[in-house]
Amino acid sequence: MATAIDIPTQPPQTINGSITLPPPQPNPYTRARESLDRDGFVVLPASLFPSFDLDALRAAAKRLTTTSREGKWPYIRTLPKQFPPWTADASQGIWGVQHLMHPSNPDHLTFAKSYFDAELLKYVAALIGCEQGEMVMELYNMLVRPDHAWSLRWHRDDIAADATAEEELERLGKPGFHAQWNLALYDDASLIVVPGSHKRARTATERSADPYEAHIPGQLVVELKAGEVVFYNNNILHRGVYDETKERMTLHGSIGTTLGSAERARNVLQHGVGEWIKDYDFNDFDPDMEKRAKGMRERLVDLGKKSGDVEYFSKDE
Ligand SMILES: O=C(O)CCC(=O)C(=O)O
């Protein structure tokens, strides 16, 4: 099981009346980046994000999940399909809700406040290695408990299962140019990763394993407490294993950077964000958030213009 990295805050020590400062602690953003680079994921404690309003987010998440299960929200991840595109047909059940910030969602601002949260964006910039002014708005979706027991196969988000070891290494050697995270609104142990696998080709065991193999050597269940955030490299070997009896409402976001826009175009636009983002109105945001959000939206629209048509990653699965 993974636990959140500990960000210590030590008070000054007093010895014989004089104050000695504690040894300097590494900056928390740097520490998070080191963990992500080393392990392929990093869990951040809820205490780092005091501005997340979990009660408001849960209420908004419940409303949209109910609407989605009733077939009244067309942007859903449907069973039994792992990759986009998904249809709007909820009759076989859902495992995700897409486009939380779509302006037709009455609660879109509640979700947007967590997506454009100033502290979250500081971590995003540090984890990607870019400036705030280079960040690009991408996806904000939600992963929910499926209507029956279900799981995703082992995969890397942007490398096909039949890639050769050379192809895997070539892709893994390039920067990801984005950050992807899960923010759990309820305790969540659905995500399973193989730490360190974001830096190497699959082993012979991993390559020949059943796609739904229950135990891959070294695998680790990422156990999130409500309010915790896991950032992970989306090309780490991972899967989702879902318990239909346990409430799951985990916000699933990604943010990119202009440094890598061409690389990211397919990943983002295959989810259909381009259809509504141009009309997005940020006027209800507080001025700082409005500025951040508008900049990130503009950069996404530019990316859409440059990238043209996009293909789906794995259309039929
Ligand atoms: O359920 C999860 O946390 C993992 C989701 C996932 O692997 C995916 O959407 O590709």
Image (cartoon, rainbow, N blue to C red):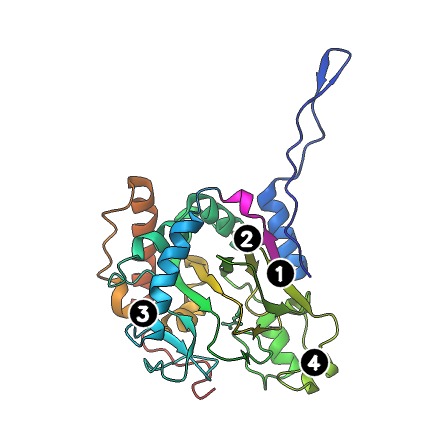
Q: What is the secondary structure assignment of the residue under circle 1?
A: strand
Residue span colored magenta: 40-49
The residue under label 1 is which amino acid type? Glu
Image vertical order of residue 240 relative to residue 229, above or below = below
Look at mark 1 in the image and give the residue it sits on: 223
Residue drawn at the location 31% of the way across and 69% of the way down: 67
Assess whether mark 1 and mark 2 are in contact (beta carbons under 8 angstroms): no
Q: What is the secondary structure assignment of the residue under circle 3?
A: helix
Residue 288's image quarter? top left
Mark 2 vs 4, N-terminal side? 4
Q: Nearer the viewer, mark 1 or mark 3?
A: 3
Q: Nearer the viewer, mark 2 or mark 4?
A: 2
Look at mark 4 in the image and give the residue it sits on: 206
In front: 192, or 156?
192
Look at mark 2 in the image and give the residue it sits on: 228
Q: Where does residue 217 sit, x and y in percent of width and height?
A: 75, 74
In front: 68, or 35?
68
Q: Is residue 21 left or right of residue 285?
A: right
The residue under label 2 is which amino acid type? Glu
Q: Is residue 34 left or right of residue 264?
A: right
Look at mark 3 in the image and give the residue it sits on: 67
Assess whether mark 1 and mark 4 are in contact (beta carbons under 8 angstroms): no
